[in-house]
Amino acid sequence: MNLDPKTPAGPLADKWNNHKAKLRLVSPANRRKYHVIVVGSGLAGSAAAASFAEMGYEVSCFCYQDSPRRAHSIAAQGGINAAKNYQNDGDSVRRLFQDTIKGGDYRAREANVYRLAQVSTNIIDQCVAQGVPFAREYGGLLANRSFGGAQVSRTFYARGQTGQQLLIGAYSALSRQIGLGTVKMYTRHEMLDLVLVDGKAKGIVTRDLVTGAVESWSSDVVVVCTGGYGNVFYLSTNAQGCNVTATFRAHRRGAGFANPCYTQIHPTCIPVHGEDQSKLTLMSESLRNDGRVWVPKNKADTAKPASEIPEDARDYFLERKYPSYGNLAPRDIASRAAKEVCDEGRGVGQLVDGKRLGVYLDFSAAINRLGESEVRARYGNLFDMYQNITGENAYKQPMRIFPAVHYTMGGLWVDYNLQSNIPGLFVGGEANFSDHGANRLGASALMQGLADGYFVLPYTVTDFLAGEKSGSRPSTDAPEFQSVVKDVNDRVAKLLSINGTKSPRYYHKALGKITWEQCGMARDKAGLEGAIRDLQALKKDFWENVKVVGSGDALAPELERAGRVADFLDFGIMMCLDALTREESCGGHFRTEFQDAGEAKRDDAQYAHAAVWQWQGEGQLPARHVEPLVYEETQLSTRSYK
Amino acid sequence: MALTGLVLAGFVLGHMTGNLLMFKGPEAINAYAAWLHANPGLLWGARVVMIISTVAHIWAGVLLSLENRAARAGGPAVAATRRATFASRSMPYSGIIILGFAIFHLLHFTFRAVALGDVSFGDDVYKMVVAGFSSKPVAYFYIISLLLLCLHLSHGVSSVFQTLGLRNERWRSRLDGLALAYGWIIALGFISIPLAVLTGYLK
Amino acid sequence: MVQDNGKEQTLALKLRVWRQRRGQPGAFEEHSLAAVPTSASFLEMMDMLNEQLIKAGKDTFAFDHDCREGICGMCSMTINGMPHGPIPGVTTCQLHMRNFRDGETITVEPWRARAFPVLKDLAVDRSGFDKVIQSGGFITVRTGSAPEANNIPVPKPVADEAMDAAECIGCGACVASCKNGSAMLFVGAKINHLNILPQGQAERDRRTLSMVKTMDEAGFGNCTNYGECQAHCPKSITLDVIAKLNRDYLRARVKEFFSSTGKPSKGGD
Ligand SMILES: Cc1cc2nc3c(=O)[nH]c(=O)nc-3n(C[C@H](O)[C@H](O)[C@H](O)COP(=O)(O)OP(=O)(O)OC[C@H]3O[C@@H](n4cnc5c(N)ncnc54)[C@H](O)[C@@H]3O)c2cc1C
Ligand code: HEM
Ligand code: HEM
Ligand code: SF4
Ligand code: F3S
Ligand code: FES
């Protein structure tokens, strides 16, 4: 596997500019002769597709929702980082870079992260010009807040809907191009495979979710921006349709998949309430600014209402364990601490599967100190949301929260140009593995999606196209396309024909149970080995006993789900394998065997690399390769939040 | 719609005020009628504006109602209304009945072709009106139509502001109240006449 | 909701759910569910129904949904005649079963409007909304051509007003609740968001005229000020946006009418 990161030479600060100056161009008259396929219409996909079209390329864009505006980027609440230093608090490109690379626990590629910090300022300019209604100060200039424990205020936000507003910005740019006829938008189309011709990505195969038609599309380059794979855990803060199918199918065609075990757990989600739950809802982390996290000291108290537990019988475990950060301890640490107390049997809330999985987030102290109206002013919408979902009034009784899977740092391996190891296959946004290392800082995924889409891919894809002969793309009648179409049709037919007894959702839940238990917040060797065996058995069961109702020629949600679950099953095995073979703890990956009294213990000597997995064929375990991470200007240090 | 509606709403106000002269006695109303007829320019000017507005209003109203019905495609099987007022929902119906009324009314008092018996009133509008409302069915028909006019105006007048972009959350309820008051003033003003005839106050 | 004995409260429900294939007439099907936890969301209740159908070997009901947290605008069910159901200010996915009674019959239909044809069962085609945006719902700014963000101060009240309008999630409940099938609330929200901001002024009239034209062509009805849309909008967008849309439209039309004809046009723009 060729895993050359193609990092440009020179000092970090100059790499991107030097590199840009060297990238090849395509003359304007020639651009319309190239066809660019963009899969995904989230921040990364919309931004890329709009930019390519503005440059003059012929673009086709695909998404599975009924409108590009609904990609899951829309759900981001908190905000987007940028090194603008508008608050004059000492922020700079270098500082954003340092925070991001440290936040990622030194498992990201230095040059990529630096570039991300560099273009972050252009993103804000671009979005404001598009009409994104960021929060403002009375003077009319942009407001910022500090987010996720950062020491500077560099986060831009639009009420609790930053993701929706940014996506509407990118979507409007994309829509303008659709209106002009330069982008052909295919909504309700799911990418089910990648087509390679002579080793290069030259097209995709999709299923029209409305008519069931399986079609192939030929292009000069394929750009995949299909988001994250958090749904491998069944319950997550992701949307129902989020899937690994697009990236996993590319993986099966030869693309390396990097660091699948790096997943992020968000500490402040509304806990699971029952067996029929389909989704976990995130509440902004800002709640931890004023809420105090606790559980009862005694197991016997867990079923009692909070009001009956006296102050001295409460364990404010974050304040106890991490006195300097207290309730604001980083996401992974706060999440793990919550899991530990619940595993000890001190969790609160509803019994689900014989366990109480929840901890209190208590605002009574804040209400006493600030008054209810001030708390309402700060968090009113979150309290309303909480009440709507749980039916409980958080002004009167403490909220219950529990960690949930929220973001996936792993993804298709890409080089500095965001090109995978398959020439012509580019990957942007959450779908690639590039910038967040083992843990993502709050408010930096939106930044990365837009950076990739607006400010990186337009340059690097152009460079690739400059090396392709215009008009040389194959016809979809070519045997390479026909055989992939046949593969996809066969698979759809197979799923519909098994006609077993258990629903796709049954398998998805079972899969989620295994991955969450064994490859969630804390992992260990025996658990992971067991999980791999269990997943292999579950996969076998799936292909023998799944029942997919509906027909292939109409909207068939069960068929869609079955296809996605099938890929998640294979993917889950790879994820556990990655977690098993990374014998260290770093960022979101916590191996209980490798810790210093609860702190993640990295092993830089052996694991300062990206693990890249290569598909070895059906029934085989994938093969592990590595891309060593070279740090030219960064001193690796140990995180400590004690 | 808004402009024509405004013209029509203005007309009914003027007409209503003129009609109230009935209460000042036969001389006043007859003099008013005579004055109108003595100024054919004014009279016909107003008539032309009225005819154009009415035709345009009805034409637009009917087209709009048909278009909207088609756009709704039947609507849900279970109907539910959270906020739309009865008045707003019945605009086309109240409108059509008002049109029916207006036609009858013209035949009644302007062309004097129906329901007045074979009496010739000459220029005595006062007598004609009293005679006209002496028939109970006619008087009741007037009263019912005027209540519908109230309904039509109570939505329509506030609606005009929205259509012209001169309304916001703060002003909405005030304008709604204004329109309701306007509708009632017009209706009660008009109704007072048949009512007074029925009760024998005007003879 | 948990009862004192630690058990979850459940409901027995009768459901009348719309079944339809694309291009064919549809009808209601009746089903019942024995034990729906009151803590479940409406869509989780529908999941339970679908799982029950799978067990019986029957086709499930197709419905649109994605984020299940009230922001993507994909979920779209008319519940007992009310788009997004009986609780104002929430989407279908955020509606919870504790708002229903044990033994209740619930009627579930798709969005009903000519401009939203049914694709299957409860899923409709809302591409008309996208077409409206494509015709003008943007501020033209090529990637990389934007000026420094703080060069254009935007007074906070203006930014807040734009944000109020921008909260629209494009779900279509306004159209589904309007007795005229009108999209004025959606289009009003979209036009307001951009027309209020200083960045949006250059294209203001063009945007307004073009979006209204596309809206009419897409088969939506006209607004006669029912106000149902506001009452069903999960983001509580107000009729103000319609008033402002009307005002901007009139302004643009008048300006267009009296605009200088300029030098003879050579075509293009
Ligand atoms: C609840 C929540 C809150 C968050 N809050 C923040 C925050 O405050 N700040 C921050 O920086 N980040 C946040 N994140 C993370 C961030 O939102 C995402 O990482 C980012 O938006 C991903 O963007 P994307 O363009 O890569 O993918 P998405 O926006 O997920 O887009 C994926 C696109 O791919 C398409 N697609 C997927 N699969 C297929 C297929 N098989 N075929 C065809 N099309 C396909 C989809 O239709 C969609 O258009 C949050 C995430 C969640 C879940
Ligand atoms: C003399 C009689 C009438 C008067 C004074 C009158 C007045 C008005 C007014 C002021 C409006 C509000 C316009 C707006 O919202 O912009 C209106 C609306 C309407 N009228 Fe009439 N109208 C009359 C007769 C009719 C008739 C005969 C019809 C028959 C179809 C009709 C149908 C409608 C409809 C459908 C509307 C709603 C349109 C809207 O709200 O925009 N009206 N009318
Ligand atoms: C109690 C109620 C009313 C009374 C007593 C009344 C009386 C009259 C009289 C006496 C005339 C004839 C004047 C003349 O020819 O010299 C007239 C004309 C007319 N009325 Fe009324 N009217 C009433 C209500 C209305 C209403 C509600 C409308 C509108 C919907 C209306 C519309 C007209 C019109 C259009 C004319 C014709 C005016 C013309 O000659 O151009 N009237 N009315
Ligand atoms: S205006 Fe409200 S109801 Fe209409 S699409 Fe937007 S959010 Fe939905
Ligand atoms: S309900 Fe319909 S009529 Fe107008 S005010 Fe709303 S669009
Ligand atoms: S599913 Fe996204 S808003 Fe309901």
Image (cartoon, helix red, strand yellow):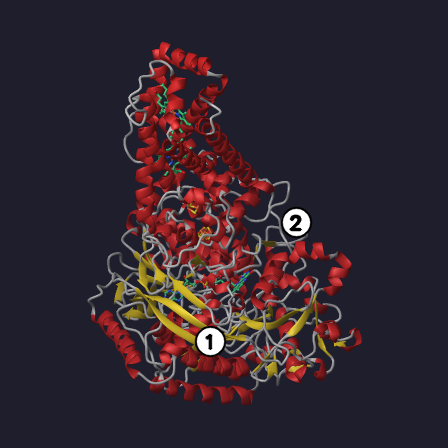
Q: In which quadrant is the C terminus of chain A drawn? A: bottom right
Which amino acid type is marked by label 1? Val
Taking the image as shown, residue A98 lies to the left or right of residue B86, namely right
Identity of the amino acid at label 2?
Answer: Gln
Asked where in the image residue A147 lies, by quadrant, the reply is bottom right
Q: Is mark 2 within 8 Å of ligand 1?
A: no
- Residue appearing at x 48%, y 56% in the figure: A450
Confirm whether residue B170 shows in the render: yes
In which quadrant of this rendering is ligand 3 seen?
top left
Q: What residue would you read off at disc 2?
A: A87
Name the residue rendered at 59%, 40% in the picture: C155
Q: Which chain carries label 1?
A: A
Q: Which mark, residue B105?
A: none
Q: Is residue C73 above or below residue A193?
A: above
Q: Label 2 lies in what chain? A: A
Residue A40 x/y as whole percent: 39, 62
Residue A320 lies left or right of residue A234; in this view the side is right
User: In which quadrant of the rendered view does residue A270 lie?
Assistant: bottom right
Residue identified by numbered label 1: A232
Relative to B130, does residue A447 appear above or below in the rendering? below
| x and y, in percent, of residue C227 in the image | 46, 46
Q: Identify the secondary structure beneath mark 2.
A: loop
